[in-house]
Structure formats: C-alpha cells, structure tokens
Amino acid sequence: MANKVSIIGAGNVGASCAQRIAERGYADIVLVDIVEGLPQGKALDMLESAPILRSDARITGTNSYQETADSDVVVITSGIP
C-alpha cells in the first residue's frame, strides 16, 4: 500500500506541494479545497503531466474531507480550514 498525503488547500502553495510530492513519487495525494472544482481541476492537470514526469502517484482532488481518511501525513496550506 502506498503512502498517502492529504493537502488541505489547493491554491498556489498546496498545488506546488502536491506537484513536488508526485514528481518524487513519495506518496499518493489527496488535494482538498472548499472551492468547488478547484482541487479536481488541479489534480487533473497534475495527472495529465504525470507521464512526462514519470510519476505514477495517484492524485485525487475533492471538496470532501472523507478522502483524507487513513492519511499518513496531512499538510495544511489553506487560510480557512
């Protein structure tokens, strides 16, 4: 089972953090934000660039905290939780 990192906040800092973790293959990523569609779009962008970066990390964008269950690490980059 792969490690799982949840990043709360899909803005510039959160998305950059997710991208670096994915590039290095450290863990699967859950990107969470309260703005509808934002984390899903950022996750899709990262997944589409994964073959170029040779990354096989699973990246999920969501507006729900349910996906963060069983995370090994949680990074909070949001101004509002």
Image: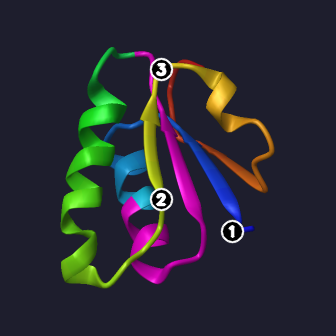
Q: What amino acid type should be assigned to the residue bearing mark 2? A: Arg
- Along the line of sight, which residue is nearer the eye, 33 or 29? 29
**Of the image marks 3 and 1, the number of the one nearer the N terminus:** 1
Q: Check the picture and name the quadrant holding the C terminus.
A: top right
24 to the left or right of 72: left
Q: Is residue 2 above or below residue 8?
A: below
State the image quarter where residue 41 is shown.
Answer: top left
Tag 3 residue? 63
Marking on residue 58 = 2
Q: Is residue 9 above or below residue 63?
A: below
Does the magenta run of residues contain 68?
A: no
Q: Earlier in the sequence, mark 2 or mark 1?
A: 1
* Picture coordinates of residue 23, whole percent (x, y): 39, 77
Between circles 3 and 1, the one closer to the viewer is 1
Identify the residue under disc 1: 2
The Cα atoms of the two marked residues, 3 and 2, are separated by 17 Å
Mark 1: amino acid: Ala
Q: Secondary structure at mark 2?
A: loop
